[in-house]
Image: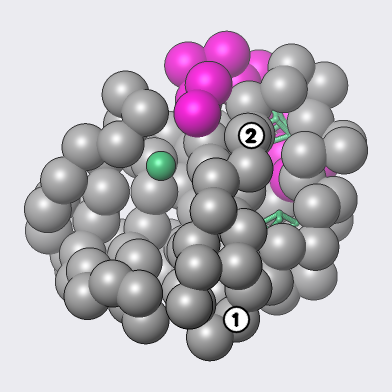
Amino acid sequence: AIDPQFHENREKVDDHNGHDVWGPVDEPDKLGIHGTHVAVDFDLCIADGACLEDCPVDVFEWVDSPGHPESEEKADPANEAQCIDCMLCVDVCPVDAIDVDAG
Ligand code: SF4
Ligand code: F3S
Ligand code: ZN
């Protein structure tokens, strides 16, 4: 599962689609965590798609991740500022790749 303490345990190494990327990143095998309020561990995401289908405010968008060992697409929290903290995405992700900081 995604580390809920990633803010402390990882470092910001990049920006992507207006959000932070938390390392380590070593493409194409290691992609890190995308987002801060809505955070997706790209190294855990298997492109299940439930988060995209269920989010009521369309926070997520697909991005390609060719060559990644888990999946060739990832759910990117492109619109994390729109999040209403419903926690649906956290509940439906089969690999617990998503953390939403509702506090
Ligand atoms: Fe969307 Fe709710 Fe997840 Fe926020 S917590 S990203 S609103 S599904
Ligand atoms: Fe990925 Fe989980 Fe969404 S596997 S596509 S973050 S439901
Ligand atoms: Zn991203």
User: Label 1: few (<14), some or many (≥20) within 10 Å?
Assistant: some
| Front residue (pair 25, 40) | 25
Residue ID at (16%, 46%): 14
- Magenta stretch encompasses residue 79: yes
| Front residue (pair 33, 64) | 64
| Scheme by which the image is coloured | one colour
| Front residue (pair 87, 66) | 66
Secondary structure of the residue carrying numbered label 1: loop
- Magenta stretch encompasses residue 93: no
Using residue 11 as the reference point, say whether residue 26 is left or right of it.
right
User: Exactly how many numbered labels are in the figure?
Assistant: 2
Residue 19 percent coordinates (x, y): 32, 31
- Amino acid type of the residue tagged 2 in the rendering: Phe
Secondary structure of the residue carrying numbered label 2: loop
Vertical position of residue 17 compared to residue 87: above or below: above
Quadrant hosting residue 10: bottom left
Within 8 Å: ligand 2 and the Cβ of disc 2? yes
Q: CA distance from mark 2 to mark 1?
A: 18 Å
Which segment did they paint magenta?
Answer: 78-89
Using residue 81 as the reference point, say whether residue 25 is left or right of it.
left
Which numbered marker is on residue 60?
2
Judging by the rendered image, the residue that carries numbered circle 1 is 70
Residue projecting furthest to the bottom: 69
Vertical position of residue 53 compared to residue 78: above or below: below
- Amino acid type of the residue tagged 1 in the rendering: Glu
Residue 98 percent coordinates (x, y): 59, 55
